[in-house]
Image: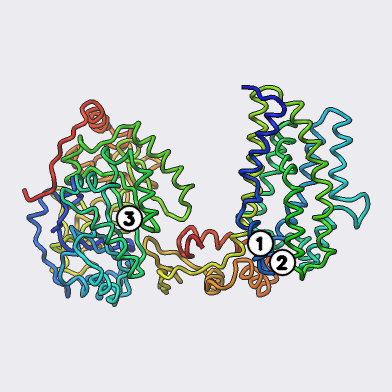
Amino acid sequence: MTRSPDELEARLREVGENRYHHRHPFNLRMHEGTLSREEVQTWVRNRYYYQTRIPIKDSLIVSKAPDPSFRREWVERIHDHDGRRPGEGGLELWLALADAVGLSRGQVEDLSGVLPGVRSACDDYVEFVDSHDLLSSVAASLTEMFAGDIMKVRIAAFEKHYAWVTAEGLRYFRTRTVQAPKDAEQGLAFVLREATSEEDQERCVAALERKCEILWNLLDAVERGCTAPHLSPHAMWRDDPAEGTLLVLPERAVKINATGREILETCDGERSAVAIASSMRERHPDVAGIESDVHEYLSEMRTLGVLQRGA
Amino acid sequence: MSAPRPFNLIAELTYRCPLRCIYCSNPVAYDDVREGLDAAMWCRVFREAAALGVLHVGLTGGEPGLRPDLDEIVRGASEAQLYSHLVTAGVTLDRSDLEALRGAGLRSVQLSIQDTNAAASDRIAGTPSFDRKLAFAEDVHACDLPLSLNTPLHRHNLDRVGEIIELASNLRAHRIELANTQYHGWALRNRTALLPSREQLERAAREVAEARITFPDLEILFVLPDYYSDRPKPCMGGWAQKNIVISPNGRVLPCHAAAEIEGLEFWSVPERSLEECWGKAPGMNVFRGEAWMPEPCKSCPERVRDFGGCRCQAFELTGDAGATDPACELSPRHETILAARARAEAVPADDFVYRGPQ
C-alpha cells in the first residue's frame, strides 16, 4: 500500500527510533559518562575514518543527480566537511577534537589505528551509495534526521562527564547541531517528493535500515576494540617437534607463530585489543599496517576459541 | 611408506551404556566385544599415542563413566600430555566424580542430548535420562570444565533444531555438534525411521543459519547428511590418516565402524605396539591414500577433498568396501541411496529397535 508523505515520514522516523545508533550500548555508555579516556580516544580515532568517507559519499550522490538545483544544494555538504580552504570544515574540526582528547593529528590522519571492522562498515556505506540509485542513496543519508538530537545529548554529556576534553574539541558537535537538521530537511523533502510508489517507498525504508545497520556495526567494532581479549583458560600450550608452538583446545589445535605468540601472551584480560595493537606497533615500527593485522588476528583467534568468546 | 601422523585418539573404553539410543554407532553385536584393557594398558597406549604425535584423546564408549577406573585412565592421558575429552551421556557421573576427573587432568566434556524435552529425548535414548543430563551440564560448569553438546539429528528432532541450539546456549555450551545421523550400526538398522525428508533438512539448514546470527558466541557444527548432499563425506579425514579408534578389546581401527567390514585384518594393542597397529596392520593400509580407488574416484578432482568417502558405508550398502561410496551421485550404486530416501519419504516408519544385546 502506497503511503502518504506524512505516513512515509512517520515510517522513516520509526526506523530511526528503533535502529539508529543512539541505542547502541557504546553510545549509551558514552552519554552516561562511563567511557574511559582510552575508549573515548579509540572512538574519535575510528570515527574519523567515517568522516573521511562522507565527502566521497556525497560526491557520488552529486554525480547521480540530473537536477542542477539539487546538485547546487547537495554540494554544500562537501564544503561543510572539506571547507572552502585548508584549515576549515568538519574534517578539520574533527582533528581538533582528536587533539582535545589527547591524540596526535598525525596518528589520526594516517588512519593506522582504524579497526578493520570500522573500515569495512564505512566502506560498506560508500559501496552502498555507489551501487544504488539517487533515491536510495539519499534515503540512506536520512540518519541525519536523528543526528541533531544525538549531538545535543553528546555535548551535554561531554561537558558533564568528560571535562578533560576542552571546549575547542566540541566545536564539531556544535556545528552539526545546525548542519544536520538543515541537511536532513533537504534529503527528507527529496525522498517524500520522489518516492511515490509503494516499491520506491519500501526501497527508501530498506536503505535507511541498512544505513542504521552500518552505523551500528561501526560501534560494534569500536566496542570490540575496547574490550580486553583473554586467552581461553582451556587452552594448553604445547611445543610440538614437527609443528612448532601449538595451542591445544577442546576441539582443535592451532598453530601459533612467533608473532602470534607475542600477541597472545599479552591477552591477559586487562589490556584492550587497541592497546595490544598499539604496543605491537611500538615494538615493530617497521611493519606496515601492523595494527590492523593484530586486530584481524585477534578476531580469528576469537572465532577459533583461542581467545574467550563473548569477551 | 611411512604412516601419516595421527592427531586424535578415540578411546572406546567400554561398550556398556545405560542408554539404548536407536542410532548408536557401536557395532550391532557390541555385546560380544570384551573389555580387554585395564587402566595400566590404556596408560601405555596413551604414552605411545603421544609419541606418534597424537594431541587429543576422546574418552568415549559406550559410556566411559561406567569404568570404575576412569580417573586413573584420565590421569594417564594427562601424564602423557594428551588433551583429554570426556564424551558422555551424563547420567552416571555426579559432581564429585567430575571434580575427581578434573583433578586427574580432564580437560573438557562433551554431553549428548537427544532432544529438547524429556519425553522426546528419553524416547530416543530408550531410558529416562533428560533431566539428569541438564543437571550434569551444571556440574560441568561447577567444575570449570568447558562444555560442548552433541545432538545427533534425524527425522524425529530435526524440526526442533532451532530449539536445540537455544538449549545449548541456555546450558552455556561453547559448541554444539549437530551431527546428522550416519547410517552405521544401530542407525542402519533403524534407517527408515530415522532418515529425514529433504524438506525437513532444508528448513533445519535455514534455522541453523539464523541461529548462527542469534548466538554468535556459540560454535555450531552442522553438516548436511551425505544421503542428501549427493557427495560423500570426507570420512575421518581419510582412512587411517588422522584418527585412531581403539575399541574396548584393544583393536586398533581407522573409525568406529571399520570392525564391521568383513575380511580386514586389524591388530590389537595388548599384542603389539600402537605404532605397529597403526602403521603396519593390513586393514589400516588397504584403503590408506589413493591407490585402492576405483573409477570414477581415481580420476575425480574431488578425491583430495572427500578421500573417496566412507569405506564402511560402501561395504554396508554394496558388500564391497573398495567400491565408490554410494552416497556419491557418480557411484554406479547411487540408486541404493535414492531408494532408501524414497522409502523413508513414502512410508516414514515410527517403530524402531532399541540398542540392546542381540
> For numbered disc 3, what is the local secondary structure?
strand
Residue for point 49% across, 65% down: A307
Left or right of B66 on screen, residue B235 = right
Q: Residues within 10 Å of mark 3 (few under 14, many from 20)?
A: many
**Relative to the observer, which residue lies in front, B117 or B67?**
B117
Q: Amino acid at mark 1?
A: Glu
Q: Amino acid at mark 3?
A: Leu
- For this orientation, the residue located farthest to the right is A85
Q: Amino acid at mark 2?
A: His
Quarter assignment of residue A184: top right
Q: Residue B117, percent across and down?
A: 27, 47
Location of residue A109 with respect to B324 vertically, above or below: below
Q: Residue B259, percent across and down?
A: 16, 52
- Cβ atoms under marks 3 and 1 closer than 8 Å: no
- Cβ atoms under marks 1 and 2 closer than 8 Å: yes
Same subunit under labels 3 and 1?
no
Location of residue A233 with respect to B182 vertically, above or below: below
Alpha carbon distance from label 3 to label 2: 46 Å
Of circles 3 and 1, the one toward us is 1
Q: Does any portion of residue A102 appear in the rendered image?
A: no
Q: Does any portion of residue B107 appear in the rendered image?
A: yes
- Residue at the spot of label 1: A32
Alpha carbon distance from label 1 to label 2: 8 Å
- Residue at the spot of label 2: A161
Residue for point 69% across, 41% down: A127
> For numbered disc 2, what is the local secondary structure?
helix
Alpha carbon distance from label 3 to label 1: 40 Å
**Relative to the observer, which residue lies in front, B264 or B227?**
B227
Q: Which mark is residue B149?
A: 3
Left or right of A131 on screen, residue B79 = left
> For numbered disc 1, what is the local secondary structure?
helix
